[in-house]
Image (cartoon, helix red, strand yellow):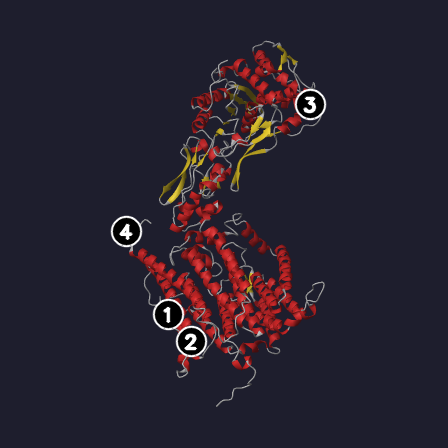
Amino acid sequence: MKPRQRPDMNTHPFVQAWSRRWPERRLLWLSVLGIGIGFGMMLGSGYAEGRAFALTDPLPWTLYAGTLVVLHLTLVSVHFQGDQILIGALAFLAGFGLLAQVRLGTFDVANPLDPGLYLVPAGIVLMLLVAIGLSHGRYARLTEGHWLWVWAAGSLVLVAVVLLFGQRYRGAVYGVGLVTPTELLKVTVVVFLAGFIDRHAKRLANWGKGFPLPPMRHLWPLLLFCLGLSALLLTQRDLGMVVILSVALLVMLFFGTGRTAYLVLGGVLAALAGALLLTVFSHGQRRLAAWLDPFQDPTGNSWQILQGLSGMYSGGLWGEGFGAGNPEYTPIAQSDFIYAVIGEELGFVGAVLLVLVFLVLFGRGLTIADQTRQGFGRLLCLGLTTELATQTLLNLGGVTKSIPLTGVTLPFISHGGSSLMTSFVMLGLILAVSDGMPARRRTPKPPRPPSD
Amino acid sequence: MNVSLDIDPWSAARLALQAAFFLTLFLLVKQLFDLRDAARLKHLSRPKGAFRTPMTGLMALFGAVLLYQATWQLTGLYRPQFVAFMQSHDRREFNPAHWIQRGRLLDRRGEVLAESLEREGRVQRHYPDGPVFAPVVGYTHPRFGASGMEAVVSRQLDGGDPNSLKDLGELGRRILGGDKRPRGRDVVLTIDAELQRLAVERLGARRGAVVMLDPRDGAVRVLASVPAHDPNRIDAELFSGSDPATPLLNRATQGLYPPGSTFKIAVAALALERGFNGTLACPGDGFTTASHYRKIRDHEYYSARRTGHVWEGYGRLGLERALAVSSNVFFAQLGVLQGHDAFQELTERLGFNGQILLHQSTYGRFAMRTGHWPALAANDQYGLAQAAIGQGRLLVSPAYMALLTGALANQGVAVRPRLIATARPEVLARFMHPDVANRLAAMLRRVVTEGTARAIDIPELAIAGKTGTAENPQGDAHSWFVGFAPAERPALAVAVLVEHGGYGSATAAPIARDLLQRAHALGLMPSASKP
């Protein structure tokens, strides 16, 4: 391992910051190298099949590498103290997503003006802006005063507007151009919930004695908000989002108040609601049937999942090699079913390694929450990590037929502009929290260090 | 690993690149763990480990998903429906499902009834004998699915159920080696290929069915149904149902026919159990239960009339003699004498109106129908008289008649018919009292030595049996023979049905004799002990 370089008082602050962020640098290098090899494999397969070499072929990778350089230099120059492992894991996942999208032909690589090519770089930049903009404890202002209610109202209005003006496609409602603005809920709702639970933590923890009933007097604004939002989302048939937000809510309530009762009550309610929803929604029943017995209707409802599983079976342990598979046989592989393509081309080993990177990401998110004493930041970090983990689990579970399909994307990997951007914003927030509070807030003794 | 010399440079480069990619990815994961210390968040508070439990839970959840994923991705071979789906609906050339060498179906002596042959990279199923074994083996087709034993033992044929340490080792080797040519396992059936071929050959152009089984352990030696479809050529036409020969119908197990006189053995068993020991008057011009019904008469009455004579009748007959001459007049009376309740109880004990499972798995079931018997109105004496001679509304399947005859030969105990050599014999039910079964067996031997089936008597085989000529509204009578041999210690029971074959003694009985003779030559049954 590289010897630790002690920051010297005489060296320039930039050099100090540069030497402090060497782990991040090493992880970024490895990511750039790995994704580069992946591009080599993919392009090689293309040429082996007789595709002509094009000058723009390495463009996505160059863009990606360039963005990472910018990211790293910016973080160093602003003396960002936030987590480095998180950035390493994210850099790999984002690059892997880009690679998979180029592989699936989502973008027109020959056309350097295709906006799709710039999605991942733009996302990384967005994340950087959020992280820096809210670093140094500035994220706490998100929930100051009435801002808390702005997030709540904004969330509801957002869903309502999409519901009013959106268009129906494959049973769900989308915004203009099949963008899904509701993805933003993952940020706004968690900001509201974290702020609310943090403010009322003591009162929400007071379940009273004797017959255990939740403190309804303090809980009702939260309940009202959740019911309203759920109703709106269910009208849109966005079951995946409801699950993601509900899990985040329960986890935040539990860790914010320390009351296990919330988990129990939430579990019971979720079971009841699930049973109720299944009787109401026909597409939910279809998905459940396709999950329980995919061979009942193999060429209809279960076609996509069985094709995905067939692809993974073809991949076996080591896979056919990146670029050598036939992901085109799995319908709409680039969004929900991208994991099946990874399983097909990189095999079980590739899938396990990818899951490990995801687990590192979630683990870091939880570590940051663990080390944050500021209530709002702690809950925010926990909520966002929970959402990312739930979403990943829902996607992987659905594609592998472990659970019924919910139609959620795989964070950072799946195609889908709004989902991708939201994931980057979420990570930016976690990074901002990991930057910590400025020293004066943590140690209130000297209100302002005298400048000399 | 098999390295061929004409490997193109890209294949080698691809392997190297993939290895490098995995290595880098592995290194990255390792660094992500290793650098945790170097990248500690020292400016934040000290960690409390508050989220250690949720993180463990998260890892367990993802681990579970990966494990489940492995059951499809690595051991998908053990999901026959999944393999079948891929074989018919997956167009990926490298999908191992297209390379599976499904196991063979073998007869009891190892003759191949169904095998997989490789042709241009795809594996095709081949049935060397065409339609001969189709009623047992069934077919398997990417589009039309599978039937018969091909469906029922699909799991074993595709290589599923590793049931020994060696199999598990083989599985591991296959997964690690990325073996794209999995091989299934062979399944040995109880069928005797030579006897089955003989049965089909002797049925010839007629429609009919032959079932032969070992009454002691239920092993089915012959399960023939003619005409049958050719499993090598399955097309949509076959399923349209337009062929009047109904080649998809398994006559042996699913066809229902009036049993005619062969059913008299069941009525005889009933009477014996209820203590019948006397004689009945059998007048020449027959018997009926009410004057407005047509009289039930013996065959001799009609042959006499044809030559302008009047037949005197048998006079008073005992049960043994009545069975030997197959007197309708006697059995119609005997049936009426036993009454509705006793007859109803008999059909229930014999398992009428049901199915008997020969073999079952999640991928299909091999079943046979027993018989059809709608309950009669309590005052319908004529219906009862008809049923007692195997006519009227009583119907049976050929496989069931073999089972019933086998039970009689096996001291009254019916053993579940089985098609898999390694399947355990299983007692199905006691059809009749052992004493009754033994007495009946002796009587059936007399049918062959001096009764209607005397033409097929071969002393060293000691065949016992009963002929049947079942009238039916569609034309000539169906020809039946049921029997077993050798009479004292039966080793084989047989039921032969030839649709519209005329007299049982003339058509069905000789087929049964030939089969038993060949079975004797093949060592499937001992010689009769010298009297």
Chain that bears disc 2:
A
Q: Position of residue A266 (x, y in %)?
A: 63, 62
**Answer yes or no: do the residues labelled 4 and 1 have beta carbons within 8 Å?**
no
Tell whether B306 sits left or right of A24: right
Amino acid carrying mark 3 in the image? Gly
Q: Which of labels 2 and 4 is toward the front?
A: 2
Whether residue A414 appears in this view of the structure is: no
Cα gap from disc 2 to disc 3, whole angstroms? 102 Å
Q: Which of labels 1 and 2 is toward the front?
A: 2
**Answer yes or no: do the residues labelled 2 and 4 have beta carbons within 8 Å?**
no
Cα gap from disc 1 to disc 3, whole angstroms? 95 Å
Q: What label does residue A62 carry, if any?
A: 1
In the displayed structure, A62 sits above or below B308; it is below
Relative depth, front residue between B208 and A320: A320
Q: Which residue is mark 2?
A: A20
Cα gap from disc 1 to disc 2, whole angstroms? 26 Å
Indicate which disc, 3 or 4, sits on the residue closer to the N terminus.
Answer: 4
Relative depth, front residue between B501 and B200: B200
Chain that bears disc 4:
B
Q: Which residue is mark 3?
A: B339
Q: Secondary structure at mark 3?
A: helix
Are labels 4 and 1 on one chain?
no
Amino acid carrying mark 2 in the image? Arg
Q: Which residue is mark 4?
A: B6
Q: Which of labels 2 and 3 is toward the front?
A: 2
Whether residue B202 appears in this view of the structure is: yes
Cα gap from disc 4 to disc 1, whole angstroms? 35 Å
**Answer yes or no: do the residues labelled 3 and 4 have beta carbons within 8 Å?**
no
